[in-house]
Image (cartoon, rainbow, N blue to C red):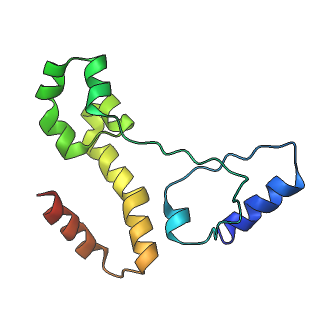
């Protein structure tokens, strides 16, 4: 959305009694469309993947040791951890919806297959 930062600022400044919750990937920041007009009017929260200690507290250190290879391949995203049988599908969806779209849009990359090959090489 063009000028999302300015639009949010106008909403917050015009309607003093409302709260706006804007969520999404880092694409807003990457595209540099915000230009920081919300300074002093916002709170930012980062949602990080699970930490190994968090998972071990729920299962066990031994169980997490057994799952380490799968966790290294598919990551620690909550959706993947909570649905391990769908890990590959969920990871591909996350990559397609966020990673590829953000990076491709940011740099106007015309050959997404090259980006995918680079990511596979880095992962290996």
Using the rendered view, name the quadrant where residue 64 is placed: top left
Specify the farthest residue to the front.
40
Residue at image point 19% right, 69% down: 117
- Residue 112 x/y as whole percent: 31, 74
Residue drawn at (74%, 59%) of the image: 8
At 26% across and 31% down in the image, what residue appears?
52
Q: Vertical placement of 97 versus 48: above or below?
A: below
Camera-side residue: 25 or 89?
25
Left or right, 29 with respect to 22, comes to left
Q: Nearer the viewer, residue 48 or 111?
A: 48
- Give the residue displayed 22% in from the left and 64% down from the top: 119
Number of disc labels = 0
Q: In the picture, residue 120 is in which quadrant?
A: bottom left
Q: Quadrant of residue 115?
A: bottom left
Which is nearer the eye, 88 or 50?
50
**Horizontal side, residue 95 vs residue 28: left or right:** left
x, y percentage for residue 107? 41, 79
Image quadrant occupied by the N terminus: bottom right
- The answer to whether residue 35 is above or below residue 53 is below
Where is residue 18? Give x, y as percent: 82, 43
As rendered, which of 34 and 115 lies closer to the eye? 34
Which image quarter is the C terminus in?
bottom left
Judge whether 26 appears above or below 43 on screen. below
In the rendered image, residue 100, in percent from the top left (x then y), is placed at 37, 65
């Amino acid at each position: 959305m063009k000028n999302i930062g300015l639009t949010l600022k106008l909403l917050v400044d015009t309607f003093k009694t409302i709260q706006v919750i804007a969520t999404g990937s880092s694409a807003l920041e990457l595209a540099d469309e915000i230009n920081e007009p919300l300074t002093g009017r916002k709170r930012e929260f980062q949602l990080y993947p699970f930490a190994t200690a968090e998972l071990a507290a729920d299962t066990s250190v031994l169980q997490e040791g057994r799952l380490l290879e799968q966790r290294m391949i598919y990551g620690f995203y909550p959706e993947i951890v909570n649905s391990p049988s769908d890990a590959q599908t969920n990871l591909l969806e996350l990559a397609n919806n966020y990673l590829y779209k953000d990076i491709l849009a940011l740099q106007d990359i015309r050959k997404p297959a090259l980006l995918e090959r680079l990511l596979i090489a880095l992962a290996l």
